[in-house]
Image: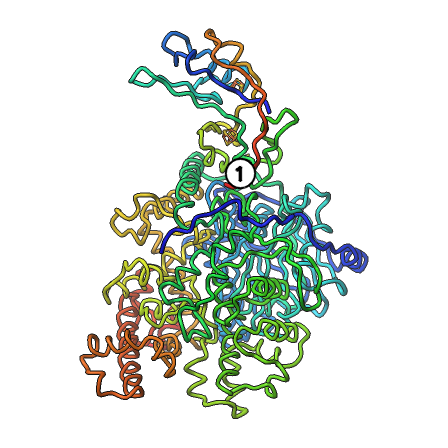
Amino acid sequence: MSQVVFDPAKVMDVDYTKRTEYHAELEAMRVSRRLLKEVAFTPSLPERGYNGRTLHVDVGTLAVTEKPVTPQMKDLFVGGRGFGLWHLWNAVTPRTRWNDPENEIVISPGPVCGITQYAGTGKSLVVTLSPETEIPIDSNVGGYFGPLLKFSGFDALELQGKSEKELILFIDGQKGILRLEEAPVGPVDSHVLAEVLTALYAENDADRVNVSVVSSGAAAGHSLIGMLNFSWFDTRRGCIRLKQAGRGGIGTVFRDKGIKALVCRGPRVRGDLNRPADLETLAKVGIKYHREIRENDPHQCMMRRNGTAHIVEIMDAYDLLPTHNFQYGSHPDTHRIASTYWQQRCTQVTADGCWYGCSMACAKGADGLVLKTGPYKGHTVTVDGPEYENAAGLGSNCGVFDPDWLLELNFYCDTYGICTITWGTLCAFVMECYQRGILNEERTGGLKMTWGNAEADLEMMHQLARGEGFGRIAGQGVHRMKKIFAERGWGDPRLLDDIGMENKGLEYSQYMSKESLAQQGGYALTNKGPQHDEAWLIFMDMVNKQIPTFEDKAEALYYFPLFRTWFGLAGFCKLPWNDVVPADNARQPEAHKVPEHVQNYVDLFTATTGWKITKEELLVQSARVYNFQRVFNIRMGKGLREHDRAPYRSMGPVTREEYESRAERYDRQIVEEMGLDPSGMSLEEKMAAHRRWREERYRKLTDAVYLRRGWTPNGVPTLERLKELGLDALPEVVDVVRQHL
Amino acid sequence: MKQLRIDVGRCDYGRHCEHECEHACAEKVFKLKDPAMAALHIRELPDGKGVAALCDQCGDCVVVCPADALRRNKPGVILLDKKLCVGCYMCVGFCEKDVFERNPEWLEPYKCISCGICVKVCPRAALEIVDVPEPAPRII
Ligand code: SF4
Ligand code: SF4
Ligand code: SF4
């Protein structure tokens, strides 16, 4: 692969300040809002990253309470995802379902979240019981809401109960007022709603940067795959931008609770609002990192030019780009949705970080998109230039290689409040079912779900947003579609199980793990289901070849889920960790861990909290939360070995065509790995031999990983492990484990 | 656009002068005692030559600033609006000439404002303020 050369002359000339404006919607919202309750609170700034306060709002009873953050919470859970899981644990029982009022949505910025000197430091974590998996889901999201919530006075926001009215919660951290309002009319879809609410709650134009909105969209309420958008105001474009808490249906819970939006108006941001222990270190480490981006990014990933989309062509070149529901790993049309195109399509002379100080600035925006379908047909909009996951999921995996259609799909997923990754994988599943005759025009109610048919794909989505037709079935996700199809006698249930790319009820994200044992584990041996948050190992396994042996892979499945969990405890984004690396990184021991950056994180955490940690202690902080989450899963009825089973499509060739597309590689493996002679074998025999070998390999990997993690062969954390981590201080955690030993 | 220039033939890099420019910049413009904190840097090198680091008002820092806190004024000089600055120091990290400055006492960084005070104090008349066309914003 040769390095892409960025040519500034080819960047399209698009006026990034022009887009459709929503004045009527703003007026409708302004006149129809009605105050239900107003409560005063004392705004505060964090001290060394913590306010020590949690805000709890019951949207059913409208009760507003404050709770302290205890020293034990900080010791055991740090913040962010840790706080979210702990609050959720206390809110639910093993019988709680996602749509019970006691289920909570917890939003928590970690202690480091909100510093402005380093890249990727505005992340908050959202935790709830997922409608898709029925266990806790957590999602790491940018946008300004988390930092502004913290600078208003709170380390976490718990939302519980259910409202019968369409509710807006407004937290005014400048004035110390919290308002619950009814908003019966007006927009639900995020690109309009966040724009309107930002204008409505800001005191003047300059105040708009201090306002952030959390919202979902019309499709979230009719599906299980709803997602949340977190906004920030982009001063140069003069519009709101959105970042997503995507996976696992958090937006569905939000809409089920009757929440239309959360709005936070914080104080004007400055570089020291976190009141860190050692600002000088934050400045030094931050400037060193900004320089590294300036010098290395143009020769490495070009994140500032194309965001994460740079790996589209790399994945294709290595036969790892999911194509046609993960059947194949490349496609001749990939160049049409590769980074060279996005560099030209995205606006370039602007700052595209989703929080201040993000020099990696991957939140590229594609401006001037004129929509061709749906309720906003003809509108000119700004949409995020697709991230890799969206280009692969909405694009190659569904056979869509037209970049404009891809942007439109991305736009509607965002504004309708559904997860792009989930939609990509479930639509690819629908399309393969259509290809194999499991679905047909009659069964889909007229949708011709052929590969690459973006218009049908979009119509399915518009149906979901309207709550009708086959779109509603699709919106149940792959796990439930498999059941529905099987019940109706559509297709062979075993085939559906093999090709339906989900585990624990969550759809796979967009990497072809068939040839990467490490990524197979990285997907299915996870707490929350197959995503790339916990263990994105495909690149180091298949491209950089940094974890060649079985032991390396098992070790990587111990280390990386823990290391990556930590970003969500402290309030960091993961991308700045390894999407740029120091020039001499390859010469360092354990280069795949990017040791200099690990040290940066240790230093940033210590400089913010004043709490001296080492890189080993960083892992222990994570291990506590990671194991706690595993126990939480077990408490909710999942989290055992049987739930870590992976669909065969993620492990090997399900169909004849898949085998034939890589026959040479697969035949060679029969000789080299299995010691058999393929020449006398039929295709079916070869496929069966592969399946045995691959499933056995995955079984062995599972054993090795569980052992390394300190779990029993059934995937249960041992009492010794809990003790080692100090989790035996929580008797209710120990009780859950005892029942499974 | 007003731009500070140095004539490298005239500047003797502190061999005979007292770094008057740096002193004047630090003390008079920014009210800082340490001349090393000035918005320009003149350094003698062991080989008898020297280096001067000056802001040429290129505008790279304007492009990277996430808070829109850096703007050109009418004469084209880039100024920092402290009310908007969020102290992220991206401007500092992205300045290729390493002349976007910060010091441990201040939250906001600072830079050359092409005021010409250094020009006036240079005993060898090596510095001048010139008027040159503003460059188009670069993609950074
Ligand atoms: S401070 Fe640096 S980046 Fe900014 S205008 Fe001056 S030379 Fe250019
Ligand atoms: S430190 Fe201030 S002026 Fe410099 S880039 Fe950040 S916000 Fe802009
Ligand atoms: S022009 Fe003014 S601000 Fe710039 S280096 Fe000279 S004295 Fe300092």
Q: Classify A434 as above or below B118.
A: below
Question: Which chain letter goes with mark 1?
Answer: B
- Looking at this view, is A82 or A322 the one in front? A322
Residue B34 point in image, percent of width and height: 44, 18
**Residue at 43% across, 61% down:** A533
Color scheme of the displayed model: rainbow
Question: Closest to the observer: A668 or A429?
Answer: A668
Relative depth, front residue between B90 and A65: B90
Q: Residue lying farthest right?
A: A31
Residue A280 lies left or right of residue A224; in this view the side is left
- Location of residue A689 by image quarter: bottom left
The residue depicted at 32 percent of the width and 76 percent of the height is A714
Answer left or right for A120 relative to A665.
right
Vertical position of residue A401 compared to residue A199: above or below: below
Q: Position of residue B79 (x, y in %)?
A: 59, 28
- Pointer 1: what residue? B138
**Residue A695 at what x, y percent from top left?**
30, 79
- Mark 1, other Cα within 10 Å: few <14 / some 14–19 / many ≥20: some
Image coords of residue A226 (percent x, y): 58, 68
In the displayed structure image, the side of residue A189 where residue A653 appears, left or right: left
Looking at the rendered structure, the secondary structure element under dot 1 is loop
Q: Is residue A34 visible?
A: no
